[in-house]
Image (cartoon, rainbow, N blue to C red):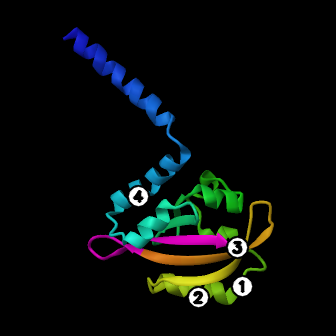
Amino acid sequence: MAEHRRSFLHAPLVAGWEFRQKTPLITERAGWLSLAKTQDWKLPASIRQELLSDQWAIVITDTNQIIHYVNLPFERMTGYSSQEALGRRPTFLQGEGTCQPMRERIRQGIDRQKSVRGRLLNYRKDQTPYWCRIIIRPIVNRQNQVVNFIAFEREG
Protein backbone atom coordinates (compact mmCIF):
# COMPACT_ATOMS: atom_id res chain seq x y z
CA MET A 1 0.00 0.00 0.00
CA ALA A 2 2.79 2.47 0.89
CA GLU A 3 4.52 1.67 -2.41
CA HIS A 4 1.27 2.46 -4.28
CA ARG A 5 1.03 5.88 -2.59
CA ARG A 6 4.61 6.77 -3.54
CA SER A 7 4.01 6.05 -7.23
CA PHE A 8 0.70 7.94 -7.12
CA LEU A 9 2.32 11.01 -5.56
CA HIS A 10 5.11 10.95 -8.12
CA ALA A 11 2.78 10.89 -11.15
CA PRO A 12 1.44 14.49 -10.91
CA LEU A 13 4.99 15.87 -10.79
CA VAL A 14 5.91 14.02 -13.95
CA ALA A 15 2.66 15.09 -15.65
CA GLY A 16 3.24 18.70 -14.62
CA TRP A 17 6.76 18.63 -15.97
CA GLU A 18 5.52 17.21 -19.26
CA PHE A 19 2.86 19.92 -19.51
CA ARG A 20 5.42 22.70 -19.02
CA GLN A 21 7.56 21.21 -21.76
CA LYS A 22 4.84 21.46 -24.44
CA THR A 23 5.40 23.90 -27.26
CA PRO A 24 3.43 27.17 -27.32
CA LEU A 25 1.56 25.98 -30.43
CA ILE A 26 0.08 23.02 -28.55
CA THR A 27 -0.85 25.21 -25.61
CA GLU A 28 -2.42 27.68 -28.04
CA ARG A 29 -4.53 25.00 -29.67
CA ALA A 30 -5.60 23.73 -26.30
CA GLY A 31 -6.96 27.22 -25.60
CA TRP A 32 -9.46 27.23 -28.42
CA LEU A 33 -10.14 23.51 -28.05
CA SER A 34 -11.07 24.09 -24.44
CA LEU A 35 -13.39 26.91 -25.47
CA ALA A 36 -14.92 24.73 -28.19
CA LYS A 37 -15.59 21.95 -25.71
CA THR A 38 -17.04 24.27 -23.06
CA GLN A 39 -19.34 25.97 -25.58
CA ASP A 40 -20.18 22.69 -27.36
CA TRP A 41 -19.24 24.05 -30.79
CA LYS A 42 -20.50 22.49 -33.99
CA LEU A 43 -17.37 23.27 -35.98
CA PRO A 44 -17.14 22.75 -39.76
CA ALA A 45 -13.97 21.07 -41.00
CA SER A 46 -12.95 24.19 -42.95
CA ILE A 47 -12.89 26.35 -39.81
CA ARG A 48 -11.14 23.60 -37.85
CA GLN A 49 -8.37 23.51 -40.48
CA GLU A 50 -7.97 27.29 -40.37
CA LEU A 51 -7.74 27.18 -36.57
CA LEU A 52 -5.01 24.56 -36.76
CA SER A 53 -2.91 26.52 -39.24
CA ASP A 54 -0.78 29.41 -38.12
CA GLN A 55 -1.45 31.41 -41.29
CA TRP A 56 -4.13 33.53 -39.60
CA ALA A 57 -4.22 35.83 -36.63
CA ILE A 58 -7.25 34.55 -34.73
CA VAL A 59 -9.56 36.33 -32.31
CA ILE A 60 -12.44 34.48 -30.65
CA THR A 61 -15.07 36.50 -28.82
CA ASP A 62 -18.28 35.73 -27.01
CA THR A 63 -21.59 37.10 -28.29
CA ASN A 64 -20.94 40.38 -26.43
CA GLN A 65 -17.68 40.82 -28.37
CA ILE A 66 -15.43 40.16 -25.36
CA ILE A 67 -12.19 38.47 -26.42
CA HIS A 68 -11.70 34.97 -24.98
CA TYR A 69 -8.83 33.79 -27.17
CA VAL A 70 -6.09 35.11 -29.44
CA ASN A 71 -3.20 33.18 -30.99
CA LEU A 72 0.51 33.87 -31.45
CA PRO A 73 0.14 35.31 -34.98
CA PHE A 74 -2.28 37.86 -33.46
CA GLU A 75 0.36 38.79 -30.88
CA ARG A 76 3.03 39.14 -33.58
CA MET A 77 0.79 41.20 -35.87
CA THR A 78 -0.57 43.61 -33.23
CA GLY A 79 2.19 43.74 -30.61
CA TYR A 80 -0.37 42.97 -27.89
CA SER A 81 0.07 39.87 -25.74
CA SER A 82 -2.86 37.55 -25.16
CA GLN A 83 -3.04 38.83 -21.56
CA GLU A 84 -3.46 42.38 -22.86
CA ALA A 85 -6.18 41.37 -25.35
CA LEU A 86 -8.28 38.97 -23.26
CA GLY A 87 -11.36 40.55 -21.70
CA ARG A 88 -11.36 43.47 -24.15
CA ARG A 89 -13.34 44.16 -27.31
CA PRO A 90 -11.52 43.96 -30.67
CA THR A 91 -12.33 47.64 -31.24
CA PHE A 92 -9.34 48.51 -29.04
CA LEU A 93 -7.26 47.92 -32.21
CA GLN A 94 -9.16 50.59 -34.12
CA GLY A 95 -8.43 54.29 -34.18
CA GLU A 96 -8.86 57.62 -35.88
CA GLY A 97 -8.20 56.32 -39.39
CA THR A 98 -10.43 53.26 -39.15
CA CYS A 99 -13.17 53.33 -41.79
CA GLN A 100 -16.55 54.05 -40.21
CA PRO A 101 -18.62 52.28 -42.92
CA MET A 102 -16.56 49.11 -42.48
CA ARG A 103 -16.99 49.28 -38.71
CA GLU A 104 -20.75 49.55 -39.27
CA ARG A 105 -20.72 46.57 -41.67
CA ILE A 106 -18.97 44.49 -39.01
CA ARG A 107 -21.42 45.61 -36.34
CA GLN A 108 -24.43 44.77 -38.54
CA GLY A 109 -23.02 41.36 -39.47
CA ILE A 110 -22.50 40.50 -35.83
CA ASP A 111 -25.95 41.77 -34.86
CA ARG A 112 -27.47 39.60 -37.63
CA GLN A 113 -25.18 36.70 -36.71
CA LYS A 114 -23.83 36.53 -40.26
CA SER A 115 -20.32 36.21 -41.70
CA VAL A 116 -18.51 39.42 -42.59
CA ARG A 117 -15.47 39.98 -44.83
CA GLY A 118 -13.56 43.16 -45.33
CA ARG A 119 -10.44 45.24 -44.94
CA LEU A 120 -9.89 47.44 -41.93
CA LEU A 121 -7.25 49.89 -40.78
CA ASN A 122 -6.10 48.83 -37.31
CA TYR A 123 -3.34 50.05 -35.01
CA ARG A 124 -0.57 48.07 -33.35
CA LYS A 125 0.38 48.53 -29.73
CA ASP A 126 3.02 51.09 -30.78
CA GLN A 127 0.23 52.94 -32.70
CA THR A 128 1.62 51.98 -36.11
CA PRO A 129 -1.32 51.63 -38.54
CA TYR A 130 -1.71 48.47 -40.61
CA TRP A 131 -4.31 47.19 -43.03
CA CYS A 132 -6.02 44.00 -41.95
CA ARG A 133 -8.11 41.63 -44.05
CA ILE A 134 -10.73 40.04 -41.84
CA ILE A 135 -13.28 37.26 -42.02
CA ILE A 136 -15.65 37.11 -39.06
CA ARG A 137 -17.84 34.03 -38.68
CA PRO A 138 -20.44 33.08 -36.09
CA ILE A 139 -19.85 29.80 -34.28
CA VAL A 140 -22.88 27.76 -33.27
CA ASN A 141 -23.26 25.05 -30.67
CA ARG A 142 -24.98 21.71 -31.18
CA GLN A 143 -28.33 23.39 -30.46
CA ASN A 144 -27.65 25.78 -33.38
CA GLN A 145 -27.33 28.82 -31.10
CA VAL A 146 -24.58 31.34 -31.85
CA VAL A 147 -22.19 31.16 -28.88
CA ASN A 148 -19.01 32.78 -30.21
CA PHE A 149 -17.58 34.72 -33.12
CA ILE A 150 -14.25 33.96 -34.69
CA ALA A 151 -12.21 36.47 -36.66
CA PHE A 152 -9.50 35.34 -39.04
CA GLU A 153 -7.15 38.21 -39.78
CA ARG A 154 -4.21 38.81 -42.11
CA GLU A 155 -2.15 41.87 -42.64
CA GLY A 156 -2.51 43.35 -46.09
Residue closer to the observer: 137 or 21? 21
- Residue 69 vertical placement versus 46 (above, below): above
Q: Amino acid at mark 3?
A: Gln
Instruction: Give the spatial CA distance, label 4 vs label 2.
Output: 27 Å
* Residue 128 in picture, x, y percent from top left: 81, 67
Looking at the image, which residue is at 73% across and 80% down? Answer: 98
Q: Which mark is residue 105?
A: 2
The dot on residue 94 is: 3
Residues in magenta?
A: 139-156
Element marked by disc 4: helix
Closest to the observer: 130 or 148?
130
Give the quarter of the figure containing the N terminus.
top left
Q: How many angstroms separate mark 1 from mark 3 (CA)? A: 9 Å
Residue ID for mark 1: 99
Cβ atoms under marks 4 and 1 closer than 8 Å = no
Q: Quadrant of the C terminus?
A: bottom right
Residue at the disc numbered 4: 35
State the residue at coordinates (50%, 34%): 20
Neighbor class of circle 3 (other Cα within 10 Å; few <14, some 14-19, many 20+) is some
Disc 1 residue type (three-letter): Cys
